Image (tube, coloured by chain):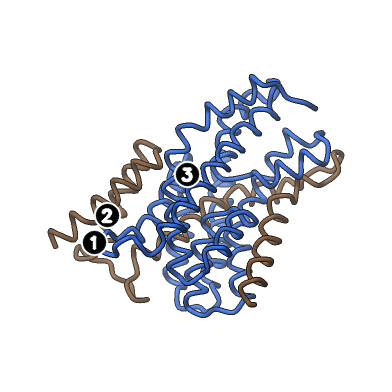
Chain colours: A blue, B brown
Amino acid sequence: MSFQRSDLAEGVRASLPVLLGVAPFGVITGVAMVASGIPPLVAMLMSLFVFAGASMVASAQLLASGSPVLLVVLATLIINLRFMMYSASLRLHFAHAPLGWRLLIAYLTADNVYGLMLQRFSERPDDPGKLGYFLGAGVAVWLAWQAAVLAGVVIGAGVPASWRLDFAAPLAFIAMSVPLLRDRAMVAAALAAGVTVIAAHALPLKLALLAAAATGIGVGMAFESRKT
Amino acid sequence: MNLWYTLAGMAIVTYLARASFLLLPAGVETPPLLRRALRYVPAAVLTAIWAPELALQKEVLFLSLENERLLAGAVAVGVAWRFRLTFATIASGLIALHLFDWLI
């Protein structure tokens, strides 16, 4: 399996509009990590090794409130469980790629990159150039993300609290989740998860998030089977 | 020291989630029920992350026209629904927050 320069370029071009969303979220993530007391170097290492903004913002909040390591890791696992779904879906395209490429594809998998791949190839799974397209989009998003987090880490506490930039984190999640709501089952899953997490918010250990994920999956699947 | 364990733990579970199905041998089928269930994970989990940030204030449910985060979040949901643009969603939500803050 190999790729051509034109496929890489197509992936990079497709990622450009997405970078407009990646950049602010990366800056917010960098600011949130430093503001919660994570040293800049560790924040940057986290960005390189974990490379998953949602879980990094959540962990920053948990660390700031003195949560134990296991809880932070558990919350990260729940939030990043969605990558398993991307992995199952990307497997349809890359199951026959050499192991090295699959390890790299796994590392570069991000919400936006997966979304681009889905847009481009879900209706035309036999089109050539999948690997190049994924790598082009993936590397472009990765570079933009790391640069944005670095900017956020450097700006750090320099952002005045009166700008209320902390609110940009939930807004970024709204921007990621709402476009997923393409059918009634998906809307039902999201509504159920939202109501559950609020109703269960008093539960300890981020169990509310786990309960919300389970309820969302259950309600979504129930809606889906009712329809068919 | 705890910070390093946290970093390592987060990196490991996140990479394992990303690699999971991609590392299965080519012949292995993903169980259909599991694939159906996983389809709802992103919408459910991402919604569960932002919903409390809008609806709760200091750990208490605050559904009121005086909750400017709730109102600004509703604006952002509308923009995200209509335009599907990350940047427009974040910008409109932040502007709405300041606007409602000033009005209320």
Quarter holding residue A71: bottom right
Mark 2 → mark 3, Cα distance in angstroms: 21 Å
Q: Which mark is residue B72?
A: 2
How many neighbours does mark 1 have within 10 angstroms: few (below 14), some (14-19), or many (20 or more)?
many
The amino acid type found where label 1 is placed reads Glu
Q: Position of residue A69 (x, y in %)?
A: 62, 76
Q: Which mark is residue A63?
A: none
- In the image, are marks 3 and 1 on the same chain? no
Q: Which of the two residues, A167 or A154, is positioned nearer the viewer here?
A: A154
Query: Quarter of the image containing the C terminus of chain B?
Result: bottom left
Q: Residue at x 50, y 65 (%)?
A: A58
Residues under numbered marks 1 and 2 in contact, where contact means CB atoms less than 8 Å apart:
yes
The residue beneath circle 1 is B68
Q: Please tell me whether mark 1 sits on a helix, a strand or a loop.
A: helix
Q: Position of residue B75 (x, y in %)?
A: 28, 49
Q: Is residue A5 left or right of residue A224?
A: right
Q: Is residue A3 left or right of residue A111?
A: right
Q: Is residue A139 depicted above or below B8 in this figure?
A: above
Q: Nearer the viewer, mark 3 or mark 1?
A: 3
Q: Position of residue A16 (x, y in %)?
A: 48, 31
Q: Chain of mark 2?
A: B
Mark 1 → mark 2, Cα distance in angstroms: 6 Å
Q: Is residue A201 left or right of residue B17?
A: left
Q: Chain of mark 1?
A: B
Q: Position of residue A37 (x, y in %)?
A: 48, 72
The amino acid type found where label 3 is placed reads Val
The residue beneath circle 3 is A22
Q: Is residue A179 depicted above or below A219 in this figure?
A: above
- In the image, are marks 2 and 3 on the same chain? no
